[in-house]
């Protein structure tokens, strides 16, 4: 029996007619998603080693993270659109190939500019690869199988983030920081071979396949505008905010970002970000909260990694292991949030999560140059990580509840983009402020002030500002209206189960022609207008 997307319940088939087991397709999707998520976190523990070997400046070191995050955010929605238009297999292989080659180039980097460029290209590859993995799942599985596949995909994505710090620590300590990038090469190569053998092509419905349209101009202007803005912020450690240099860079960023908005409103046939989505309070409010949360949480991993190694003297391996409890806490928080969402609703969970995060960052800002991990790092880190897990599900629910059902995927993509953009801009601002604070302490402090004391003061200042960002997110949570989960639109899994039930009862031919089947229940690309 085939489902509404033309796949078979017993598994898809290759061009030769051989049946492909579910686990093979699911593995192809999940391994690639694991790589994409892993690469956001795996470099954090390696940052001190990278900075020393490639002679990054204190403020420039953040580009190892931001170069990846900015291009990933800027091209993410474009990658999702490409998977729909050009087919899951083609886009998957393109993204995986670009990601793997960029990993090789980054691992061979001889200077900071080389590595930063490679990381930016990695981000573009990840932006095409990640949506393709989700497309593979939703076009292969249906009904209960889809629910299980999405659960596995989400779990692997979470595991990638949690495993990144540990794996980065092991590779950096035992071999070299270069292996945090080289590790992608054997994984990417093996996965590409598996995709060539097992993965078949599939496209969603498209009215005019001969003239597919991608908003490439929008992706380029958005990415260039954000990168220029971050560059201007980072440059304030040597050029004041009022200097002609900084103002000219900010002007260029403004022109690029205004151009992006105009492209979305006036030019793009299929804009990356349809601004009509933000007419909904739940969509606009959830994206504001996510932007602020992303700005705060990206800084935690970055500054804690530097603090543990540069101040407390941890090895890369020990620093990686120190992050394990926080990875576990995120998973626990996510499970709690998912279970309480139906009972409490969206806004109460957001208020609790943002308040906990603010308190955790305020606690973390009390670190000293001679603090102990268990007394000053573990406790606040645990609270912050629990808060992050609590916020995942309610933010996703709020972002998708205020839009038409056939735009829920787009709204979810916009939310993810807001998180990445918030993280990159927030990291730039907080890193610049932290370095300024460090310089002030060194230049104007007592002679007995050590570099460890100065660094700690800078990191503490960043955590204080992160707490304020979480308080702002707490206030922004009131933008989101009260959402009754029981009144939500049906999930994709539920819709597919209904479609399967109709197929079983009336046959596929009747499903596609029966005027009594409401078009609103059909999934995007399933033939609905």
Image: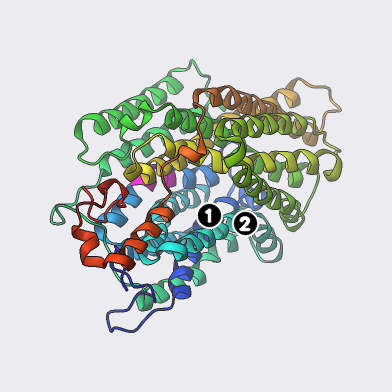
Q: CA distance from mark 1 to mark 2?
A: 8 Å
State left or right for residue 526 relative to residue 430.
Answer: left
- Quarter containing the N terminus: bottom left
What residue sits 83% from the left and 28% below the top? 449
What residue sits 34% from the left and 42% below the top? 407
Magenta residue span: 71-77
What residue sits 86% from the left and 38% below the top? 370
- On whether residue 56 falls in the magenta region, the answer is no
Query: Alpha-carbon neighbours of circle 2 within 10 Å: few (<14), some, or many (≥20)?
Result: many
Looking at this view, is 160 or 255 the one in front?
A: 160
- Residue 509, quarter of the rendered image: bottom left
Query: Looking at the picture, how far across and down is residue 194, in whole percent?
Result: 42, 76
Q: How many labels sit on residues?
A: 2
- Residue 415, quarter of the rendered image: top left
Magenta stretch: dominant SS?
helix
State the mark number for residue 164: 2
The figure's colour scheme reads: rainbow
Looking at this view, is 341 or 228 the one in front?
A: 341
| Disc 1 secondary structure class | helix
| Disc 2 secondary structure class | helix
State the mark number for residue 37: 1
Which tag, 1 or 2, sits closer to the chain's start?
1
Q: Is disc 1 in contact with disc 2, using a CB cutoff of under 8 Å?
A: yes
């Amino acid at each position: 029996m085939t489902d509404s997307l033309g796949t078979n319940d017993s598994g898809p088939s290759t061009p030769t007619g051989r049946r492909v087991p579910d686990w093979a397709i699911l593995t192809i999707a999940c391994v690639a998603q694991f790589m994409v998520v892993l690469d956001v976190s795996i470099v954090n523990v390696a940052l001190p080693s990278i900075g020393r070997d490639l002679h990054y400046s204190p403020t420039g070191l953040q580009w190892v993270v931001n170069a990846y995050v900015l291009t990933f955010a800027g091209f993410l929605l474009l990658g999702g659109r490409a998977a729909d238009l050009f087919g899951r297999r083609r886009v998957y292989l393109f993204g995986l190939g670009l990601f793997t080659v960029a990993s090789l180039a980054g691992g061979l980097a001889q200077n900071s500019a080389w590595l930063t460029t490679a990381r930016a290209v990695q981000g573009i590859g990840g932006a095409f690869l990640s949506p393709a993995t989700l497309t593979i799942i939703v076009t292969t599985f249906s009904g209960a199988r889809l629910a299980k596949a999405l659960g596995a995909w989400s779990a692997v994505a979470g595991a990638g983030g949690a495993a990144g710090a540990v794996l980065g620590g092991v590779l950096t300590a035992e071999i070299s920081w270069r292996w945090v990038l080289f590790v992608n090469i054997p994984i990417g190569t093996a996965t590409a071979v598996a995709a060539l053998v097992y993965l078949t092509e599939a496209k969603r419905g498209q009215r005019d396949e001969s003239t597919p349209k991608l908003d490439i101009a929008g992706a380029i202007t958005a990415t260039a505008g954000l990168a220029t803005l971050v560059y201007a912020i980072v440059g304030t450690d040597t050029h004041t905010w009022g200097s002609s240099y900084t103002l000219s860079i900010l002007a260029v960023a403004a022109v690029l970002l205004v151009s992006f908005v105009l492209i979305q409103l006036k030019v793009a046939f299929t804009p990356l970000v349809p601004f009509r989505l933000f007419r909904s309070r739940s969509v606009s409010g959830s994206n504001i909260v996510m932007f602020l949360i992303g700005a705060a949480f990206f800084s935690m991993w970055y500054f804690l990694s530097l603090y543990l190694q540069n101040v407390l003297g941890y090895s890369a391996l020990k620093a990686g292991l120190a992050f394990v409890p926080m990875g576990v806490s995120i998973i626990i928080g996510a499970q709690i949030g998912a279970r309480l969402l139906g009972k409490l609703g969206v806004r109460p969970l957001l208020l609790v999560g943002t308040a906990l995060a603010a308190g955790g960052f305020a606690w973390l800002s009390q670190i000293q140059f001679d603090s102990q991990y268990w007394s000053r790092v573990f406790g606040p880190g645990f609270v912050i990580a629990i808060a992050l897990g609590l916020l995942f599900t309610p933010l996703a629910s709020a972002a998708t509840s205020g839009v038409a059902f056939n735009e829920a995927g787009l709204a979810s993509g916009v939310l993810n983009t807001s998180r990445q953009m918030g993280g990159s801009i927030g990291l730039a601002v907080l890193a610049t402020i932290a370095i300024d604070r460090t310089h002030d302490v060194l230049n104007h402090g007592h002679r007995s002030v050590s570099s460890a004391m100065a660094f700690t003061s800078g990191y503490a200042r960043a955590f204080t500002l992160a707490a304020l960002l979480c308080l702002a997110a707490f206030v922004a949570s009131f933008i989101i209206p009260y959402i009754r989960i029981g009144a939500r639109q049906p999930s994709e899994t539920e819709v597919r189960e209904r479609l399967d039930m109709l197929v079983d009862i009336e046959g596929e031919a009747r499903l596609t022609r029966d005027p009594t089947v409401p078009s609103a229940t059909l999934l995007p690309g399933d033939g609905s207008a």
